[in-house]
């Protein structure tokens, strides 16, 4: 009996364990990364709408997905979310193994969006480091403080 249990235990260990391990997304850290990037970013708060249904977050055949969305909301300025924005955004949802990013069109999002010419682009990974769904008031206050050149320190992980 011990031998069977030992063989069973070894066979279970032979299969790789898959798990996605992400650091907790932090709005101040995302702001710092965007402001230090050679690329130009804007911070948007609002909703993304899509013509087609979005795929689930876990898929058997994970592949990056490019889609067009319509954004409606506000742009972050040094005075807060003061400018209304309605614009198309090109979104790339990426995967890490079977885990893929997705968006909930029913949610309000705080998003770091790249500006390239007149095009808005956003890449979202499964750890959501630059996209925050239904941001809490504290999160919005922190990002407004960052934009106003106030203290903008990431939270301790």
Image (tube, grey):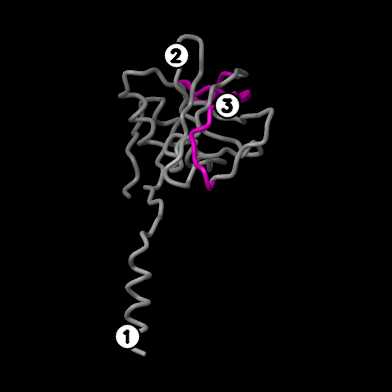
Q: Judge by depth and name the residue closer to the eye, 121 or 41.
A: 121
Mark 2 vs 3, N-terminal side: 3
x then y, percent, for residue 69: 61, 25
Q: Residues within 10 Å of mark 3 (few under 14, many from 20)?
A: few
> In the picture shown, does residue 16 fall above or below 100?
below
Q: Residues within 10 Å of mark 1 (few under 14, many from 20)?
A: few
Is 78 on the left or on the right of 39, as rendered?
right
Tell me what residue is drawn at x 31 percent, y 48 percent. Answer: 156
x then y, percent, for residue 59: 54, 46
**Mark 2 to mark 3: distance in Å?**
17 Å
Q: Quadrant of the N terminus?
A: bottom left
What span is in magenta? 58-83
Say the numbered circle drawn on residue 70. none
Q: Which residue is mark 2?
A: 116
> In the picture shown, does residue 123 fall above or below 41?
below
Mark 1 vs 2, N-terminal side: 1
Between circles 1 and 2, the one closer to the viewer is 1
Q: Residues within 10 Å of mark 2 (few under 14, many from 20)?
A: few
Between circles 1 and 3, the one closer to the viewer is 1
For the residues labelled 1 and 3, say whether their Cβ atoms are less than 8 Å apart: no
Mark 1 vs 3, N-terminal side: 1
**Mark 1 to mark 3: distance in Å?**
54 Å
Element type at mark 2: strand
Q: Which residue is mark 1?
A: 3
Please tell me whether residue 115 belongs to the stretch shown in magenta. Answer: no
Q: Which residue is mark 3?
A: 67
Q: Quadrant of residue 31?
A: top left
x then y, percent, for residue 85: 59, 19
Element type at mark 3: strand
Tell me what residue is drawn at x 57 percent, y 24 percent. Answer: 74
Element type at mark 1: helix
Is 13 on the left or on the right of 83, as rendered?
left
């Amino acid at each position: 009996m011990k031998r069977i249990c030992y063989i069973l235990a070894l066979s279970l260990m032979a299969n790789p364990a898959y798990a996605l391990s992400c650091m907790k997304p932090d709005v101040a850290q995302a702001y710092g990364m965007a402001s230090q990037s050679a690329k130009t970013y804007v911070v948007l708060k609002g909703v993304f709408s899509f013509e087609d249904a979005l795929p689930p977050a876990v898929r058997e055949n994970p592949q990056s997905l490019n889609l067009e969305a319509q954004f409606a909301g506000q742009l972050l300025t040094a005075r807060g979310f003061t400018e209304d924005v309605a614009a198309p955004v090109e979104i790339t949802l990426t995967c890490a193994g079977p885990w893929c990013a997705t968006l909930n069109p029913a949610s309000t999002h705080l998003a770091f969006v790249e500006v390239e010419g007149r095009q808005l682009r956003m890449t979202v990974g499964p750890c959501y480091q630059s996209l925050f769904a239904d941001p809490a008031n504290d999160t919005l206050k922190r990002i407004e403080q960052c934009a106003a050149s106030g203290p903008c320190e990431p939270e301790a992980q």
